[in-house]
Image (cartoon, rainbow, N blue to C red):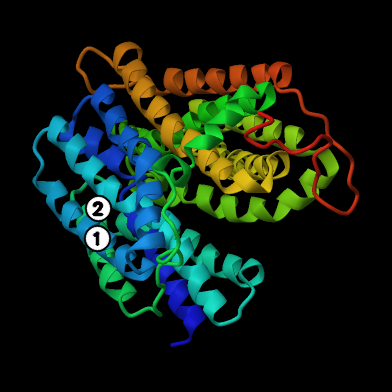
Amino acid sequence: MSTKLRLILLSFLQFFIWGSWLITIGAYWFQTKQWSGAEFGAIFSTMGIASIFMPSLMGIVADKYVNAEKLYGILHILGGIVLFTVPMVSSPGTMFWVMLLNMIFYMPTLALSIAVSYSVLKSRGDDVVKDYPPIRVWGTVGFIVAMWTVSLLGFEKSANQFYIAAGAAILLGFYSFTLPACPPPSKDTPSRSLIDVLGLKSFALLRDTKMLTFFLFAMLLGAALQLTNAYGDTFLHDFDKVPAYQDTFAVKYPAIIMSISQVSETLFILAIPFFLRRFGIKQVMLFSMIAWVLRFGLLAFGTPDFPGISLIILSCIVYGMAFDFFNISGSLFVETQTASSIRASAQGLFMMMTNGFGAVLGSSVSGIVIEQYFTAADGVTKDWHGIWLTFALYALVIAVLFVILFKHKHTTQPAEPELPAEPRLSIEQA
């Protein structure tokens, strides 16, 4: 097996694990266990909590003490063991701690998978800029295949989805030990302070008004991402309670319908260079926010039958713009607005605000709001029309505030992506 094919398998399994349960855990929680919405919000916050500190801590270990591919394998094996115990959990409180432990093991592997791939490619003399993207796209394929597998096997509301994820995690864990060695690159270099290593000095950038505004909106958009991941699948499952919809494809296989979102995500990536050159970073980020309004608004009026299903499918299509246009253009904004000495830390802060604090905010608050205002007295029936309209209004408010508060002018660049009009910020300047 060629090295690139082996890295493709790594990327495929990395996201197959996540896709096996991330979109369908809501159906298991609400349809099978019939636990509350407030407690479910806490489950999705575990990703954010783990993202705040674990990737940086495991980065220290991989940089100084343990081969990256070995650490990567150990984390996946431990995560797989935890996933095997999920079907045994009988209370939502215990479920929170089990899923938090699983996320503590899984979230660092997202960064480590990149580190391992880069290390292997560089050791071969390959160009990571050219050779890694075709490898990474197989991660999205893995996520989609996992969703289809769980759906076609009828496991969307079953605990069996966690067994599939666990098996894939343990398989990837042992497989990683067969990869080329990725020794610690900083093993013999002097140790830096924990503040430096964790990139906490990048928080000084928040003293700059424009950067503070950007990172706050990054957090708010990170919250929106959790809303669609947490509730999209179980929303379609709830139509099973209506006899007229029970035999529709969307109700039988909701995860397959929702996987259109991931397909759209891969396609919209290709459109980003054109939009950046034509409209600039601020406008592209605004397009993302408008797409979030459409994402939620279309779901509010969608139904599993025709023509309502067309609205749900269209919602999945605009998800690609909603997700890609802010995440990628946002990372480019950080790249062009910060000095090289803190650029990596600033990118880490961007991810912390979206996948960390944003995820915790979106998961926790949405669960409480749904439980208090959109769940019937029986504790099960939900007003999905009201839920999605509320989420759409949330995205619309963010978009309006972004136009008013975020001050950034586009410099026309006919051949290249936008460059900064002012000097890049260092910590001292901030």
- Residue 204, given in percent of the width and then of the height, sits at 57, 29
**Which quadrant does the N terminus fall into?**
bottom left
Report if residue 312 is visible in the image: no
| Label drawn at residue 338 | none
Answer left or right for 200 relative to 398: left
Q: Nearer the viewer, residue 74 or 305?
A: 74
The amino acid marked with disc number 2 is Phe
Q: Is residue 114 above or below residue 119?
A: above
Mark 2 surroundings within 10 Å by alpha-carbon count, few (fewer than 14), some (14 through 19), many (20 or more):
many
> Which residue is label 2 attached to?
155
Q: Earlier in the sequence, mark 1 or mark 2?
A: 2
Q: Secondary structure at mark 2?
A: loop
The amino acid marked with disc number 1 is Ile
Mark 1 surroundings within 10 Å by alpha-carbon count, few (fewer than 14), some (14 through 19), many (20 or more):
many
Q: Which residue occupies 65% across, 32% down? A: 428
Residues at marks 1 and 2, CA–CA distance in whole angstroms: 10 Å
Q: Which residue occupies 52% across, 68% down? A: 118
Report if residue 87 is visible in the image: yes
Q: Is residue 245 above or below residue 300?
A: below
Q: Is residue 347 above or below residue 153?
A: above
> Which residue is label 1 attached to?
164
Q: Nearer the viewer, residue 334 or 399?
A: 334
